[in-house]
Amino acid sequence: QVQLVESGGGLVQPGGSLRLSCAASTTAFTAYRMGWYRQSPGQQRELVATISATGKTNYADSVKGRFTIARDNARKMVYLEMNTIGPEDTAVYYCNAASIFDTSINYWGQGTQVTVSS
């Protein structure tokens, strides 16, 4: 069982920056590919970015060049640095842990709201 707790969401102006954090409670943090997903009202949850235990990253086209995902295996933390934020980035952002041994095992955080508005 993995518990994920996100933080760092809030209200940000267009063009601004925000850093989301996710704390994971597990003794096997490196056994999980970590990721950030987001969901806007009326929309399906979508991938934002993922990062493997060795640091290999994958990004949605919509955030490439603007967002950066990082992880600290020693602290069991995952981060999402968001720059040049636009109104289209308004969503609830969820932290995800996906087992590298069993693709059916996924854990989700409770989500953190990011609202982009002037």
Image (tube, rainbow, N blue to C red):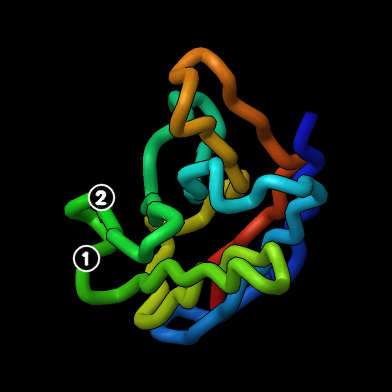
Residue depicted at 39% across the width and 53% down the height: 52
Front residue (pair 10, 52): 52
Label 2 secondary element:
loop
| Residue in the picture at 81% in, 41% down | 3
Mark 2 = which residue?
Answer: 60
Which residue type does callout 2 highlight? Ala
Residue 45 or 101: which is nearer the viewer?
A: 101
In this view of the protein, can residue 90 be seen by the observer? Answer: yes
Q: Disc 1 on helix, strand or loop?
A: loop
Circle 1 residue = 64
The one nearer the camera, 35 or 20, is 35
For badge 1, the amino acid type reads Lys
Position above or below: 46 against 58 = above
Which quadrant would residue 10 be assigned to in this image? bottom right
Res 9 visible: no
Question: Pointer 1 and pointer 2: residues touching (CB < 8 Å)?
Answer: yes
Q: Residue at x 53, y 68 (%)?
A: 71
On the image, the x and y values in percent for residue 72 come to 59, 73
